[in-house]
Amino acid sequence: MNVILMGAPGAGKGTQAKEIVKRYNIPHISTGDILRAEVKKGTNLGNQAQKIMESGGLVSDEIILGIIKNRLSENDCKKGYLFDGFPRTRIQAEGLAEFSKVESVIFLKCDDEVVIKRLSGRRACSKCGKDYNIYFRSSKKDGICDDDGAAVVQRADDNETTIRNRLKVFYDTFTPLMQYYNENKIFHEIRGDGEQQDTLKNIFALLDPLR
Ligand code: ADP
């Protein structure tokens, strides 16, 4: 099953992705996660990407397509994939089409005020990755993970200036991508700002027939 999950930053892609990959047993491939891991390791690629990510801009299509091609050659991708944060441009979408056939594109639609609040309040455990939000799901002790006592941290690009730029970049690049996948009749829009369980039910209703 080859699926793309699309949505503005903060639309809930990461949260929904975890449930989707559990149900269909496919790998969750997030280019943002891959790039953050490279930055943490201090690789060449990470050093190149770091500044761009901190400003909220886009890493080059060439680098991203290289990462994806590499990742898809791994064994766990034989059953398919769930992309989160990729493709971000029409060039990436066309590049992907040269080596893989996408079956479904799900766009999680969310109002801007909702995503700004989710992102500016978002925190995660530096050790286990557990999600928190200072507005609606804070840890019991400020800055400390409930499960393992490690530090709860904020992503470097979750500050207000960068959030606004990430949203602008998203909307600038979204329309051509949506048109591209609409031409292939595989584009679907689902509301991402209601109850998480409702969103998930709607996603499963779309994807179950592809199994
Ligand atoms: P967001 O929460 O903004 O959707 P991601 O975790 O998907 O964040 O990505 C974080 C940053 O990594 C982006 O702002 C961008 O700089 C870079 N990035 C991730 N995926 C891509 C991609 N497919 N193309 C270009 N840049 C990317």
Image (cartoon, rainbow, N blue to C red):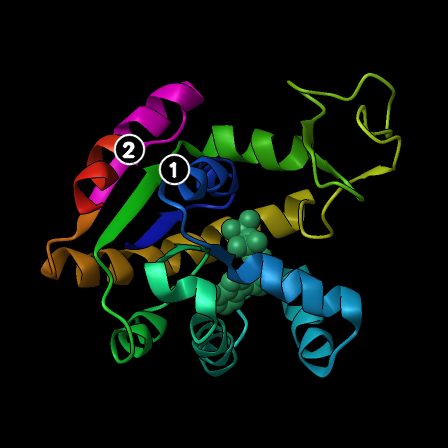
* Residue 88 visible at all: no
Q: What is the spatial separation of the Cα atoms under label 1 and label 2, in whole angstroms?
A: 9 Å
Q: Which element carries disc 1, helix, strand or loop?
A: helix
Whether the residues at callouts 1 and 2 have beta carbons within 8 Å, the answer is yes
Q: Which element carries disc 2, helix, strand or loop?
A: helix
Determine which residue is flagged by label 2.
204
Q: Which badge, 1 or 2, is on the more N-terminal residue? A: 1
Quadrant that contains the C terminus: top left
Determine which residue is flagged by label 1.
23
**Residue visible at 75% across and 40% down in the picture:** 128
**Foreground: 187 or 60?**
187
The magenta span reads: 188-203
**Residue visible at 25% across and 63% down in the picture:** 176
Residue 80 located within the stretch drawn in magenta: no
Residue 194 located within the stretch drawn in magenta: yes
Q: Residue 167 — which label?
A: none
